[in-house]
Image (tube, rainbow, N blue to C red):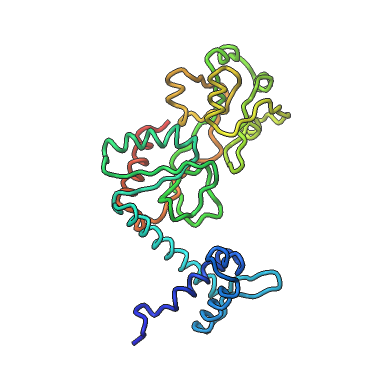
Amino acid sequence: MSRRHYNLPPLASLSAFEAAARHLSFKVAASELSVTPGAVSHQIKALEAELASPLFIRKHRGVELTEDGAALLEALGSSFLKISKVLEQIRSGDSDNHVTVGSTTAVAALWLSPSVIRFWQDYPHVKVNQMAEDTYFADRSDVDFFIRYGKDPNASLPHTKLYRDILTPVCSPELAEELKGANLRDLTEHRLIHLATKHSNWTTWTDWFQALGFNESIQTQARVSSYALALQVARKGAGVALGWKRLLKPMLDSGKLVALEDFNIPAPHNFYLVERENDSLSEGALALKEWLLKELEENSV
């Protein structure tokens, strides 16, 4: 009988291998693990010796995974993520009623947060943590699922379609009155508020104009770093923002902003819920996921 219950190599060697394989660098793995590159190399050589199989192809300027190495990385990555998630739930003190959702600041403020408030009316016991960042979310252990505009072609996590929004210029009621009957060229002569963030796959003014067949140059007279600022400028009558009708529905319904309906086009991409497999989600996470999908279905634009 094996002296190890699960017949696994030492966890230190598995941890060193996983970090080195994820980064394809012994040096970066050593920095992450707070050890020396020599220690990482020693652990990996010991692991390869125990498995009697090479896990890396050593090259002059780096390393590559062998077929066995790639298979082991996939298994370890999935297992470590599950372990990390369980530990996070244990730390929270309520593993069944805890969920963390990621989104951009715009999606969080304009849609997700109001939806979570409505969710709490039915599930007051579920702890919902929102992580709002204007950067790309990826497969990370501290997030159960996140909202993304457009599919990530390199993602390993499942994508569930939420909805396809409608893109339309939005502005103050006074400016909307002035722009009645305007064409696309007329629109370019007004101040267009451009959203400029470091990591963003949101549709731009240039994308929108090109989708309508207008390929002339567009001046950038106003650039902001957050969508909330773009909407504030538009509400004050100082420019035109590119609007998302579902996200902005409360502001459009209240009359704070007006959509220039003549220029409506479907957004090029859908919004997706990028999630872990259901068997790795807590009861609270599953409840929120199902509730959001149901609410979207019942209130389609």
**Circle count:** 0
In front of the other: 229 or 32 = 32
State left or right for residue 86 relative to residue 271: left
In front of the other: 74 or 216 = 74
In front of the other: 25 or 103 = 25
> Residue 277 placed where, x, y %?
39, 56
> Residue 155 placed where, x, y %?
52, 54
State left or right for residue 168 relative to residue 122: right
> In which quadrant is the C terminus drawn?
top left
Res. 78 image quadrant:
bottom left
Report the residue at 57% width, 66% height from top.
Answer: 29
> Residue 54 placed where, x, y %?
57, 79
Classify 84 as above or below 237: below
Report the residue at 66% width, 69% height from top.
Answer: 62
Report the residue at 60% width, 69% height from top.
Answer: 26
State left or right for residue 208 relative to residue 215: left
Classify 50 as above or below 292: below
> Residue 278 placed where, x, y %?
36, 55
> In which quadrant is the N terminus drawn?
bottom left
As drawn, the residue found furthest toward the bottom would be 1
Report the residue at 65% width, 75% height from top.
Answer: 58
